[in-house]
Amino acid sequence: MQKTQLYWKGYQSDTDNYYRRSRIFAFMSSSEGFPNVLGEALSAGLPVVSYDCLAGPSDLISDGDNGFLIPLFDRELFKEKLTLLMANDELASTISQAAVLSVKNLM
């Protein structure tokens, strides 16, 4: 398996650039309203792994279709799904395509 690098860049104003250079979007928030950032990541074609907090992520993510919803604070399952997407390019591509289509349905 190819090694993956993770960088913490802090605040960035050019988020589109980061979406274009990314392969997966990990969203670990435990409390949300409507998470715009998930819509942005999905529209950029990123497979999303997100905690299924009380409001928001389940409105945008269909588990196993355009991303993965993880029960709140289940770190092992979160890690498992990230690892699965990093190791399986075909699955990541299928979920990526579904991600873009799922956001179009919101318009």
Image (spheres, rainbow, N blue to C red):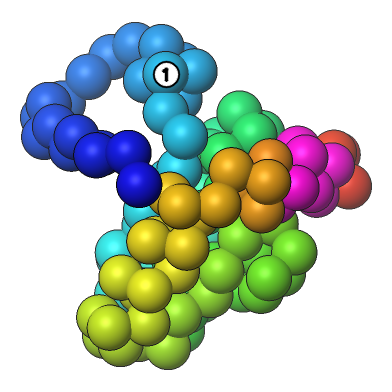
- Viewport quadrant of the C terminus: top right
Identity of the amino acid at label 1? Arg
Q: Quadrant of residue 83?
A: bottom left
Of residues 16 and 7, which is closer to you in this image? 7
Q: Is residue 53 visible?
A: no
Please provide the residue range marked out in magenta. Answer: 94-102
Note whether 104 is above or below 71 in the view shown.
above
Residue 86 vs residue 14: left or right? right
Give the residue at x 37% y 53%: 26
Residue 35 is situated, as x and y percent measured from the top left of the image, at: 48, 54
In the image, is residue 101 part of the stretch drawn in magenta? yes
The residue beneath circle 1 is 21
Q: Is residue 97 visible?
A: yes
Q: How many marks?
A: 1
Of residues 28 and 59, which is closer to you in this image? 28
Note whether 8 is above or below 30 in the view shown.
above
Give the residue at x 32% y 39%: 2
Residue 78 vs residue 93: left or right? left
Dominant secondary structure of the residues highlighted in magenta in the image:
helix
Q: Quadrant of residue 71?
A: bottom left
Of residues 94 and 46, which is closer to you in this image? 94
